[in-house]
Amino acid sequence: MFQRKLIVVLSVFAVLAFTAGTSNASLSRVEGMGLGMPELSQFTDDYQNIYMYPSSVVRQNNLVLAELGNNPSEAEDAFTPQDQSFTLIKNFPQLGVVAVQMKQSSLNLPNGSSNSNNEWWDLIWGKAFTKMDFAVRFDLANSYYEDEFNFGTPGTLQNRGISTSFDPYPFGGTFDSDVILGSGLEINTYGITPSISLHMDNDNRLDLAATYRKYTFNRAEGGAFYAPSPETFEDGGNASYSAAARYFMNKSDVSQWYLAGWYVNDDFSWTVENFAGATTSRSADETYKAYGAGISNNTRVNDNNLLLWGIGAWQMKHNYERTDNNDAVASTVTKTLEEKITTLPVLFAAVETQATNWLKVRIGATNMVNHARSEFSDFDSPTGTETEKFRFTDFNLSLGTGIRWNNLDVDMTLNEEFPFTGGNFLSGSEQAAFTRASATYHF
């Protein structure tokens, strides 16, 4: 009986594998090669790079792309797509190239993606010139909520902004670090990213991009509960920005080198007015920074097979500082915090092999050595402090498959736990066979 089940499951798995694609234009492809992080996907030529380097959109063919992503869990409703998108890229002879992506959440943000769930649009326009390509990207996510009701004594309650609870931060009195990204507070954002690509001899290329971004949020509660003034919690009004550069060098017809460096500074500073009826304000300066660099080699071996390897290093920093005197708030609350994770080295390698004339198999691995340090202080007298240091490695192996039917590609990224459980049919596990699926139609 078990052998019959195994044969059935392997047959189903084979059919599912045959529904994966070979396109160079999907997140499923780079995930299957272990390059799903934006820091790593830029080290190979792929559609995903148009969001980090918008000028690369001019090198894309006309296509329609749909993607479904899933974060597997053991819950009863485990198979629920967590992120999904639909993308159209169209070349116009005179106008240039236009890319439109529709999605619910801002999946292409360095920070705050899970807090920005009402995206209006993500547009890229680009045009190729003789020695230069130019493009600009504009993305916008925006939502609004306001509620006012009267339930008798003591009167009305006014509530503005979206959150995961009735009494969200800071109205519950919990002033702590990492509350913006760690709470589910709805964040609005817009970003403008101009980008250029400079073409050089031997078809070498330099890609440059810079982003100006604003994150905004506005929470307020008023009415009789907060007389005489409403309590408000909003962003500090500071801008965020990022810059990225990538150099593409043709060593030969079959070997290319990628050198890249980037810097991101996201500002989530905030201010609270009329906390608990007090006239004093409370605020915090809070930033998330990331910067890094790396190099990779992409080599075509045995005609149509790709071998990729590289090394990189980056650092992520979270800085938080309360600027008030902690008036009427528990003294154990955070005053300053600096968290820093240095990832050095980052080793990555992948192979994309043409298993048959229609089927490709992708295998990728990354090994990261992380050095972490955090320093904390509070409002106690004398001030309480804590310093933590630790080092750990993070190894990940990825598998993907793909097939092409004429102009249609379908890609899938294998769930690494599925081969050991066999899914619900064999073991009762709620884990899905694949964590991402995408379909790309070229026209």
Image: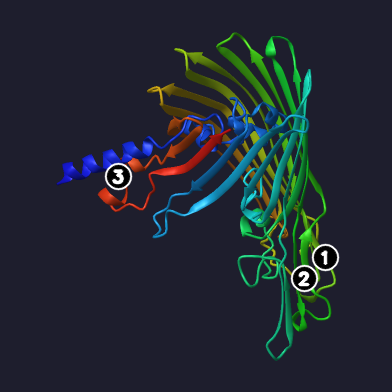
Residue 398 position in % (x across, y down):
44, 33
Which is more toward the observer, 269 or 377?
A: 269
- Circle number at residue 422: 3
Q: Residue at x 71, y 91 (%)?
A: 153
Q: Residue at x 44, y 12 (%)?
A: 302
Q: Is residue 224 above or below residue 242?
A: below
Dot 2: few (<14), some (14–19), or many (≥20) neighbours within 10 Å? many
Q: Residue at x 69, y 91 (%)?
A: 152
Q: Provide the secondary structure element on which disc 1 rests.
A: loop
Which is more toward the observer, 392 or 357?
A: 357
The residue pinned by badge 1 equals: 281
| Figure quadrant of residue 255 | top right
Q: Amino acid at mark 2?
A: Phe
The residue pinned by badge 2 equals: 275
Q: Is residue 145 above or below residue 296?
A: below
Is residue 442 left or right of 122 when viewed as pictured?
Answer: left
CA separation, marks 3 and 2? 54 Å
Q: Amino acid at mark 3?
A: Gly
Q: Amino acid at mark 1?
A: Ser
Q: From the viewer's perspective, is the residue at label 3 or at label 1 nearer?
A: 3
Residue 47 seen in the figure: yes
Q: Earlier in the sequence, mark 3 or mark 1?
A: 1
Residue 437 position in % (x across, y down):
47, 42
| Figure quadrant of residue 156 | bottom right
Residue 229 position in % (x across, y down):
83, 76
Cβ–Cβ under 8 Å for marks 1 and 2: yes
CA separation, marks 3 and 1? 56 Å
Q: Earlier in the sequence, mark 3 or mark 2?
A: 2
Q: Earlier in the sequence, mark 1 or mark 2?
A: 2
Dot 1: few (<14), some (14–19), or many (≥20) neighbours within 10 Å? some
Q: Is residue 160 above or below residue 40?
A: below
Quarter in which the C terminus is drawn: top right
